[in-house]
Image: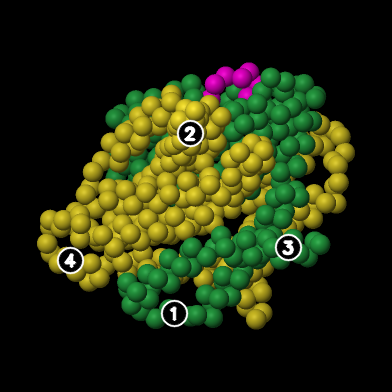
Chain colours: A yellow, B green
Amino acid sequence: MSGWLSQFAGVLLETCRDILPIAAIIVGFQLLVIRKPVAHPKKMLIGFIYVLLGIAFFLEGLDMALFPLGTLMANQLTTPEFLGIDPAQQNVAWQAYYWVYIFAASIGFATTLAEPSLLAVAMKAEQISGGAIRAWGLRFAVSIGVAFGIALGAYRIVTGTELYYFIIAGYIIVIVQTLFSPKLIIGLAYDSGGVTTSTVTVPLVTALGLGLASTVPGRNPLLDGFGLIAFASLCPIIAVLGYAQIAQWLNKHSLSSKP
Amino acid sequence: MIKNAFVKQLFNSFLDLAPILAVVLVFQVLVIRQPIPDVGNLIVGTLFVVLGLTLFIQGLEQSLFPIGESMAYAFASKGSLFWLLTFAFCLGFGTTVAEPALIAVAQEAANIASKAGIIEPGDEAITSYALGLRLTVALSVGFAILVGVLRIIRGWPLYYLIIAGYCGVIVLTPFAPPEIIGIAYDSGGVTTSTITVPLVTALGVGLATAIKGRNPMTDGFGLIAFASLTPIVFVMAYGMLI
């Protein structure tokens, strides 16, 4: 019990250290530049402590439950024995790794749904749009984007295609979509690309990428293990823009079909 | 009443987490077909995550969102562009330079660069390369938030800047050393932490609400997008220069 307590205290201390620069900047500007008393200082402070405790519990829980199991699974799923691949064989069809793609997509989807940063942005979007954008709908669209992105990234590691072909193709899709999307959604869509990958997703996805790159013959984990996160930040943009376009198209359709 | 809301939020957090549990359990039991090691830790850990998420959301609504918004209003009513931009830069730089995910990625990148022979061998060169990379990313995020805030004030359309950034990435990629490309692309995703995102979002939305003629929905978002785009460009440029 005491060992666990000291470990938790360590996590809490680490979280405090990460927050320190932010707190210093906010307090510094508040005191020196704005020079106005904060409204409800007590409530804010309690809220800040909630955030600290929340992140500490969140990280500690992930470390205890999900990360060991998730990384273990990522490693097990990419072993040659599990995939039934002869390590000496050089040319393995990319289809042989189908469990890896399924796992990549499911873990991408599930972790993104629980990502606190995405939760925050989705809450804000629902509030600002007056409920026109549902927090759940947005999170769902983003999660599907991440699922697809990570599966695609896993496929890229298996086939060994150059990363930047995919990224440039993705950028072109985003640019074309931007031209045809409702203006209201664009900022939110771009933002949702950046928030998908933080606390929960990055460690699991990195383990998957490195495991895969060390198993597939001819891949270098140092060079090919990266890039999954890039996919996970690009595909949600496409998914959210697509979601808005489909919603807009359906609206138009139902309006024009009315007598 | 407060207790009720808390319990409801606990339940919601559990629902948020349920898909991860489902994926892990299904794969472990049906696909890998191995017993789950350490069930006790799994249960306690899950309870912690649920509790943590609940506290985080509580604190978000009570503290991080109001702080971001009240600072946006204060700066808007003060009317000093200089201080607002300074604040934007400090917020971006300060929150990124200490980001644990970034420190890990920078170290990894330095090891790769050393193995690829880009920098001289030796621990000292690796440390200085990693530090340089970290500062580069932090500078780029500071720059991104600064430009993003300026955009909200001036009302420039977001997609001009984003498309310009994409073009920058596309043009730089063929010239950057191949070892750095994957890291550069990934560094865009790891810069935004769980605390930065709500603060920066509230700042953007607050500014767009406070300034006349701006729509919080069209103009308020986009700061995070910049913060994930500029590091890609800056890191590739860093890889080319060194």
Q: Which residue is mark 2?
A: A254
The answer to whether residue A6 is visible is yes
Whether discs 4 and 3 lie on one chain: the answer is no
Q: Chain of mark 4?
A: A
SS for dot 3:
helix
**Residue A101 inside the magenta-drawn segment:** no
Image mark for residue A196 = none
Tell me whether circle 4 and circle 3 mark residues in contact (CB < 8 Å).
Answer: no
Image mark for residue B6 = 3
Name the spot of residue B3 as percent of width and height, x first.
78, 65
Name the spot of residue A244 as percent of width and height, x first.
48, 36
Instruction: Give the mark toward the camera: 4 or 2.
Output: 2
Instruction: Give the mark toward the camera: 2 or 1.
Output: 2
The span picked out in magenta is: B152-158
In-front residue for pair A230/B131:
A230
SS for dot 2:
helix
Name the spot of residue B25 as percent of width and height, x first.
43, 72
Q: Which residue is mark 4?
A: A85
Name the spot of residue B101 as percent of width and height, x first.
51, 51
Residue at 43% over, 66% down? B23
Measure the C-alpha gap from mark 4 to mark 3. 50 Å
Residue at 53% over, 33% down? A185
Q: Chain of mark 3?
A: B
Whether discs 4 and 1 lie on one chain: the answer is no
